[in-house]
Amino acid sequence: MPATTPFKKHITAFLEYLEVDRGLSNATITNYSFYLHRFADYIEEEANVLSVDKITKELVHKFRLYLNRLTDYKDEELLKKNTQNYHLIALRGFLKYLAKNDIKSMAAEKIELAKQQERHVEFLEGDDLSRILAAPLSEGESLPGLRDKAMLELFFSTGLRVSELAKLNIEDVNLSKDEFSIRGKGKKVRIVFLSNEAKTWIKKYLDKRQDLNPFLFINVDRASKNQDGGLTPRSIERIVAKYAKVAGIMKQVTPHTLRHSYATDLLINGADIRSVQAMLGHSSITTTQVYTHITDKQLREVHKNFHDKKKAK
């Protein structure tokens, strides 16, 4: 096992701080660890830097060049700008932690993130949305059809992430109320709200079930080996993709597309962005602002229809 350098000892202390003081999730801490150790390994090999006080703007610049030319092992393509930025965000957080603890190093403010192209958000509306929500019942109210109808309605009613929906137990969703709490990213708890449609179809689905499985969405195929657990996120993704095809939707549709559709529907119908941020469980308003350009067309129509009506008379 290789010796731990002073640099990597500081990384370990930072990760422990994220876990204990910041209460971040294991997944987030694992990502921070990966990004920071990649940086530490690079500057050790490139410049034999083993301590944090030797980090310089020039070294960070070289690391950015390295990331920009690095091939992702998953798809053998160059690292995307947002992935490069995750490394830099982790490094900035680490440098801020060092400064907070009076440990000499480079100032975090000197690191600028790479410019990214405007993110394109796929969402469904109008006929496409109506068709995919109706698709599970195309062959009647069978148990699989009711399960999938309830699932799609719940996605559109709440904007849940696929991981959040997969973890739901029956007891988590109180159908006598219009809301329930969910523990999302970073172990943060938020309230989500049930539409009448979602409540109706969840009830029909549960009334049809004759099992003791505590999970809300389960595999109803008797040949399945997984009779005691819930559907996996991957299984849910396949179900959503299946109904997109049934509905005749040509573009790729995922559970996250339904989350985007939920957020877009709220904004177009007048919800303020801070409320949408809370309902989606975004820790930063910047994440939610990706949806605002979607509503630009709607705002143009409002301006056209309501602005300066006196001159039109």
Image: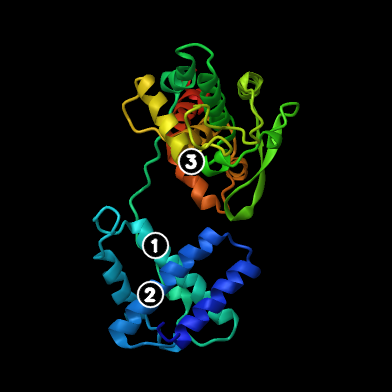
Asked whether residue 285 appears in the rendered view, the answer is: yes
Residue drawn at 31 percent across, 26 percent down: 250
Residue at image position (64%, 23%) is 210
Q: Label 1 crowding class (10 Å Cα cut-off): few <14, some 14-19, many 20+? A: some
Q: Which residue is mark 1?
A: 85
Instruction: Using the rendered view, name the quadrant where residue 67 is placed.
Output: bottom left
State the residue position of label 3: 233
Q: CA distance from mark 3 to mark 2?
A: 31 Å
Pointer 2: what residue? 39
Which amino acid type is marked by label 2?
Phe
Relative image position of residue 55 (x, y in whole percent): 40, 84
Which class describes the residues within 10 Å of circle 2: few (<14), some (14-19), or many (20+)?
many
**What residue is drawn where x is 39% and y is 27%?**
242
Label 1 vs label 2: CA separation? 13 Å
**Label 3 SS:** helix
> Which amino acid lies under the numbered mark 1 shown in the image of this protein?
Asn
Q: Quadrant of the N terminus?
A: bottom left
Q: Nearer the viewer, mark 1 or mark 2?
A: 2
Q: Nearer the viewer, mark 1 or mark 3?
A: 3
Q: Nearer the viewer, mark 3 or mark 2?
A: 3
15 up-or-down from 86: above or below: below
| Precedes in sequence: disc 1 or disc 3 | 1
**Does 152 sit above or below residue 95?**
above
Query: 305 or 180, which is in the foreground?
Result: 180
Residue 168's spot in the image, x, y percent? 62, 39
Residue 85: percent from left, percent from top? 39, 62
